[in-house]
Amino acid sequence: MTSTGSVYSLAGEQRARAESAAWSRFTAPADGGEFYAAWLSLLAVRVQRARVALLLLAQDEAGSFAVSAAWPDPQRDLKYLGPTAQRALSERRGIVDGVDGDQLVSEAGARIAFPIEMPGTLCGAVVLEVGGGSAADLQTALREVHWAIAWLVDHFRERVQRREQAEAARMALLNGLLAGALQHRRLKPSAVAVANDLATKLRCDRVSIGFESKGQVEPLVISNTAVFDKRSDLVRHLGEAMDEVFDLGVPVGHPATGDQELRALAHAEAARELKVAAMLSVPVVDTGQAIGVITLERADGPPFDADEHRMLRAVGVVLGPAWALQRQNSRSWWQRWSEAFHAARVAMFGPRHPGMKLIGSLALLALLVVTLVHVDHRVAARTSIEGATQIAAAAPFDGFVAAGLVRAGDTVRQGQTLARLDDRDLKLERARWSAEREQLQRRFQVAMAAADRGAMGVFAA
C-alpha cells in the first residue's frame, strides 16, 4: 500500500512540475511555436487519461493546415489522427470517434477533435486521444477542450489586432511621408524632408536617398546634412550599395541571412567601412522601373525586421511616382528631349515592345514608298470640247492711246516720240485720291480738336 502511494505521489509530482513548466512557457513564450506547445501541454495535463494531442493551424488563406504542436513527443507520428481532424475542419463542429454506448472503447480509446474558429475564419483544430472511461469523463474532457480553445481564439484576435494596428501605423507613416514630399515642388527639398523624417521615425543614424544618372545611382541627399563632398569615401560606399540594389531591383539588407549574403556584398563592405551595425536599402520605383534608392543605417541599433522591410518597400513604391514627376519638372527641355529620344530608341531596338517595333517598321516602309516610288496621279472628271474664234486688238502700250505718231514698220530715231497716252483717267484718279487725302486730314484735325486719341490713331495710320 505504501509502495502504491509512493508511485502515485511521484506521478503527481511529475505532473505538477510539467504543468508548472508549461504555465511558465505559456505566460512568457519566446515565440508563437512555444506558446502553442505550452497551450497544448496544459490542455493535455488537464484532460484525464489523455494519451496524445495534436494542434493544427492554418498556414495561408488557401486553406492548408499544418502541425503547430504535438504532445507528448513532437517527433511521434500522429497521422492516424488526421481523419478525425479533417472531419472537424470540414464540418466545423466537435467530433468524437471511438464511443460505444455509454463507455469508451477500452482498447483503442477515443479521439476528440474541435475546430478553432473566429468569426468568418477557420483557424485550425485540436485533436486528443484519451483512454477508456465513462461518459462523464468524456464530457469533462470535452468541456476542458472547449474552455482551452477560448485562449487560442483570444490569442488570434490579439494577433489580428496587433497586425491591424501595425498596418494603421504603417499607413500613417506613408501618408505623412507622401504629404511631406508633396509640400515641395523640386526634387531635392522633397528628398531632404523625407530623409530627415525617416531618420527620426525609424531611429536611424543616417538616411540617404540617391537617383539614377547615366546608369549609376548618385546620392542626392543625406539626412541632417546640408552639404557633403560627392568625392568622399562616404558617398562612394553609399553609391556602391545603392548600385547593388538598383541592379537587383529588390531590397537588400545587412546583416544578411542565408542565400541573401551573396547579393549583399556591397552592403557588407559599406557597413564595415562606415562602421554601422545594420543597413537596409530599398528601390524607389516608378511604373515598375527603379529610378533611385533609399538607404537607411543604424550605427549600433537592432537590424531591420521583416515589418520594416515591408514598410520601407512600400515607401519606395509610394514616393516613386511623386519623385519621378518632380525630377521631370526640374529638368531642362534638352534633357527631356534626350530622355524621350532614349526611351523611343529603347522601345524600337530593345527586347520588348513588339507593337511599337511593328508600327515603326510600317511607318518607315510607308515613308520609303512615298519617297522612292513615283506613280502617275490621275483624277477622273467630266469634260467637253467646244470650238471658238477669238480676235484680239492689242496696243503696244499700257492704257488708252491718245495719238499714234508712227505706224508699224516705220523707221524712227532714238528718242523719237512714238505715241501719246490718254492721261485723262490718270488725272481723274489723282484728283480722287487728293480729295480723299484732304478729307482724312480734316477728320484728323477734328479728332485732334476733340482729343479723341482712338480716332487720331486710325486717321494717322
Image (spheres, helix red, strand yellow):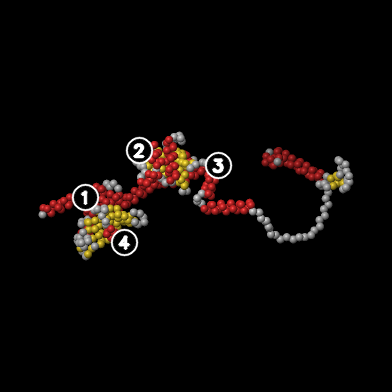
Please state which amino acid type lies under the numbered disc 3.
Answer: Trp
Q: Earlier in the sequence, mark 4 or mark 2?
A: 4
* Residue denoted by label 2: 300
Q: Residue at x 22, y 64 (%)?
A: 100
Q: Earlier in the sequence, mark 4 or mark 3?
A: 4
* Residue denoted by label 4: 91
Q: Secondary structure at mark 1?
A: helix
User: Farthest residue in the bottom direction?
Assistant: 101
Please state which amino acid type lies under the numbered disc 4.
Answer: Glu
Q: Position of residue 386 (x, y in %)?
A: 77, 60
Q: Residue at x 23, y 63 (%)?
A: 99
Q: Quadrant of residue 244?
A: top left
Q: Is residue 408 left or right of residue 82?
A: right
Camera-side mark, 1 or 4: 1
Distance between the Cα atoms at labels 4 and 2? 53 Å
Camera-side mark, 4 or 3: 3
Can the viewer see residue 112 in this picture? Answer: yes
Q: Is residue 455 left or right of residue 55?
A: right
Q: Secondary structure at mark 3?
A: helix
Residue 18's disc number: 1
Distance between the Cα atoms at labels 1 and 4? 34 Å
In this rendered view, identify the residue nearer to me: 451 or 159.
159
* Residue denoted by label 3: 334
Classed neighbour count for the residue bearing mark 2: other residues with Cα under 10 Å, few (<14), some (14–19), many (≥20): few
Labels 1 & 4 near each other (Cβ < 8 A): no
Please state which amino acid type lies under the numbered disc 1.
Answer: Ala
Classed neighbour count for the residue bearing mark 1: other residues with Cα under 10 Å, few (<14), some (14–19), many (≥20): some
Q: Earlier in the sequence, mark 3 or mark 1?
A: 1
Distance between the Cα atoms at labels 4 and 3? 69 Å
